[in-house]
Image (cartoon, coloured by chain):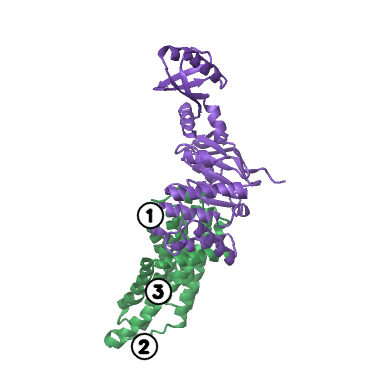
Chain colours: A green, B purple
Amino acid sequence: MGDLWIVARKELREQLRQGSDVLRYIGFAVILGAFFPMTYLNQGYGTVVVGSVLWLGYAGITTASVATLGAFFAERQRGTLETLFTTPLTDLSIFAGKMIFSLVVSLGSVLAAGVMQFVAVNAIKRLVPQLGVGMADLIVLPPVAYLALFLVLPTVLFYTVSVGTLVSLRVASVRTAHLINTLATFLLAIPGALVILLLGPRLTMNFVLALTAVMLNVDWLVLWLALRYFSREAAILNIPE
Amino acid sequence: MDSPWAIQTNGLTRYFGGRPAVDSLSLHIPRGCIFGFLGPNGAGKTTTVRMLLGLLQPDSGWVEILGQRMTPYARDLRRQIGVVLDRDGLYDRLSAWDNLQYYGEIYHMAPGERHRRSEELLRQAGLWERRQDLVGGWSRGMRQKLALLRALLSNPPLLILDEPTSGLDPLSLKMVRDLITSLARTQQRTVLLCTHNLDEAERICDQVGVIRSGRLLLQESPGALRTRMSLPQVTIAASRLTPPTIDAVTALPGVRAVQQEGGHLTVTLAQPEVCEEVVATLVAQGAGIREVREATKSLEEVYLQLMQQEA
């Protein structure tokens, strides 16, 4: 367990030290947290709630995707992963340490996006009251929305990180890695759409629980694939440009 | 019982795309030895090193490090190996200090010991004042030194170093060579040194192994290699070297070749003992001998000769 934290801490130190990376993560939080809720202006409280959860989720997913590629792909590209493989660290420690980092950063991004959303909605209510019709004063989300954030979102982030890991360790071009990761993220729409088809488009307790159950199964499958197809040799021999 | 070998391989073979990158390689490197692993680009050195470290699995054969079989899961064994690969493996966005601390943590060194050892090594390498700089902005030579310090941090009994001195200035080069030599001589560490620098191999290695097309051509000391690969030669500085004198020396049964450059003769002999006969002939022919010196081939000359023979 200790090794896992050593790797996760190093990732935090390394990636968050770079100003451009931090700015990028803040950018995701600002754009997805503050600007996109504007698209729900004047559409009533219920729509704002669903929209909020969705965009907060996407803030996390985007950050998770970028952070995972940074943690794995960049390390392969620079040759540091090969040196890391020569140490007593197990593959699982390297794997899980980096995944923990990506999850922490993406959850941080969701939190930051939530704060931005809170500020944006309240600014609209104060500055242009006619556009904020139907929005609750402090956009206090109903309990089911928090349930969605705390149950579904971690499973979705886990999926994104696992796919990112699988892709980062095998492909030889960063563009391909980003492309596959983006496509895989879009695949998330499938379980979401299935649940909506079955239960309707409202954010209900059943919807959240059903989506969580589906996502947990998807997570296991992707994690199994990531571990099953992890290969030191592929990561070392196929050095990306 | 402890194995006398720091590294032992038997029939190590690895194919890439149907072609053998390493072919039936059997190495025996004794403990406390500085072993130079030589060979042209693409000869199979990196693949061999990767198999020694358990990064690649051999298609056949096995590797034993410090008496234990190397596998991808040999964690305790990895703890005993310090490594510098062809790519330095340093984190550009971390400072020199943080790079060392990270590896110290991975090797489970206590914080106090980690800090003390990092300071000692950084001071020794002249990098102490730059310890808080991000490594990304460093020159290749400075990075190489830091990568070597990282390998030494946990005091491992075995060091596997791939081109550790490339890009170093003469002063740093000497520092690194002295460090490697002292590790082997005073602390009985074993060093496997992949290098293209034959002068370096000749200066510091106890044994060299030459690999070509994945096959180990030979493994012996640089001195024994020179002796085995070349016939004895003497260089004679003399006056009155007339054509009849040269002809008389050339006609001697134990003389293989004679080359004259001004007042110097280089005579290649079948056996070292023939030298006395050569000198006697020169004196009898009226030449005035000033100096007789044994001419030795450098490891570089021997290596090139070996490569030409194998080509």
The subunit carrying tag 1 is A
Circle 2: is it few (<14), some (14-19), or many (20+) Cα within 10 Å? Answer: few
The subunit carrying tag 3 is A
Residues flagged by tags 2 and 1 on a common chain: yes
Tell me the distance, in whole angstroms, between the alpha carbons under discs 2 and 3: 19 Å
Q: Is residue B261 above or below residue A101?
A: above
Which label is found at residue B25? Answer: none
Pointer 1 residue: A176
Q: Which picture quadrant has residue A71?
A: bottom left
Quarter holding the N terminus of chain A is bottom right
Circle 1: is it few (<14), some (14-19), or many (20+) Cα within 10 Å? Answer: few
Q: Is residue A59 above or below residue B75?
A: below
Q: Nearer the viewer, mark 2 or mark 1?
A: 1
Q: Nearer the viewer, residue A126 or B96?
A: B96
- The picture places residue B295, in percent across and down from the top left corner, at 49, 28
Mark with earlier residue (3, 1):
3
Image check: A7 left or right of B30? left
Q: Is residue B104 above or below residue A135?
A: above
Judged from the image, the secondary structure of the residue bearing numbered disc 2 is loop
